[in-house]
Image (cartoon, rainbow, N blue to C red):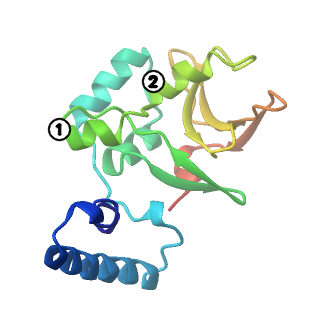
């Protein structure tokens, strides 16, 4: 709310601007006091309906690892920590309303298709997160489903490094 308030401040009447600025400041202060480190962390979690998970698996052609599937059903997207780095999870496309479509436009399939255009990106990989510097966290296809292991693909070295045996072992922010 505070981001929208500050972004749209120039179009508001003065009295409304003051009210919205005060509520935005309160929201920001509460978030900082709760330990939020950056503005992008202040987002409400959106769950994901089963029909969109099933639709995603059908489009992908593979079953999702159960821990990843369960996590995305509760919070579709968000951030996680691997080592010392923060990673932004790609959401699964949610077409239930305009707000969710907008928040999930950078969905897993779109980001994976873009990554497949890069030199030496593995053909059997599905991109699930980015560190913002070109590196991706991926699942690999194994036996008609995605493996539960999470790998980091380096865009510079084109190397894969296993970072977790299972998605559930990663720390979500």
Q: Is residue 73 above or below residue 31?
A: above
Mark 1 sits on what residue?
97
User: Residue shown at 40%/39% (left/top)?
Assistant: 69
**Mark positioned earlier in the residue sequence (1 or 2):** 1
Residue 163 image offset from top left, x and y in percent: 70, 45
- Asked where in the image residue 116 lies, by quadrant, the reply is top right
Classify mark 2: helix, strand or loop: helix
Classify mark 1: helix, strand or loop: loop
In this picture, residue 82 sits left or right of residue 5: right
User: Residue shown at 26%/41% (left/top)?
Assistant: 100
In this picture, residue 75 sits left or right of residue 13: right
- Asked where in the image residue 166 lies, by quadrant, the reply is top right
Q: Nearer the viewer, mark 1 or mark 2?
A: 1
Count neighbours of disc 1 (C-alpha within 10 A) and say few if under 14, some if 14 to 19, many if 20 or more. few
User: Residue shown at 59%/19% (left/top)?
Assistant: 142
Picture quarter with the N terminus: bottom left
Residue 34 image offset from top left, x and y in percent: 43, 81
Residue 143 image offset from top left, x and y in percent: 56, 16
Residue 65, which numbered label?
none
Q: Is residue 94 above or below residue 47?
A: above
Mark 2 sits on what residue?
109
Disc 1 to disc 2: CB gap under 8 Å: no
Q: Nearer the viewer, residue 60 or 134?
A: 134
Residue 16 image offset from top left, x and y in percent: 15, 74
């Amino acid at each position: 709310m505070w981001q929208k308030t500050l972004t749209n401040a120039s179009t508001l009447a003065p009295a409304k601007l003051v009210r919205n600025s005060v509520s935005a400041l309160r929201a920001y202060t509460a978030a900082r006091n709760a330990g939020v480190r950056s503005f992008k962390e202040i987002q409400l979690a959106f769950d994901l309906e089963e029909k969109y998970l099933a639709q995603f698996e059908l489009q992908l052609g593979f079953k999702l690892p159960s821990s990843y599937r369960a996590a995305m059903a509760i919070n579709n997207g968000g951030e996680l920590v691997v080592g010392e780095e923060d990673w932004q999870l790609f959401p699964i496309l949610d077409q239930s309303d305009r707000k969710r479509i907008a928040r999930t436009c950078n969905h897993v399939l779109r980001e994976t298709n873009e990554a497949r255009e890069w030199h030496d990106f593995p053909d059997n990989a599905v991109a699930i997160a980015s560190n913002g510097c070109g590196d991706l966290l991926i699942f690999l296809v194994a036996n008609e489903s995605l493996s539960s292991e999470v790998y980091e693909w380096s865009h510079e070295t084109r190397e894969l490094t296993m970072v977790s045996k299972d998605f559930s072992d990663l720390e979500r922010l």
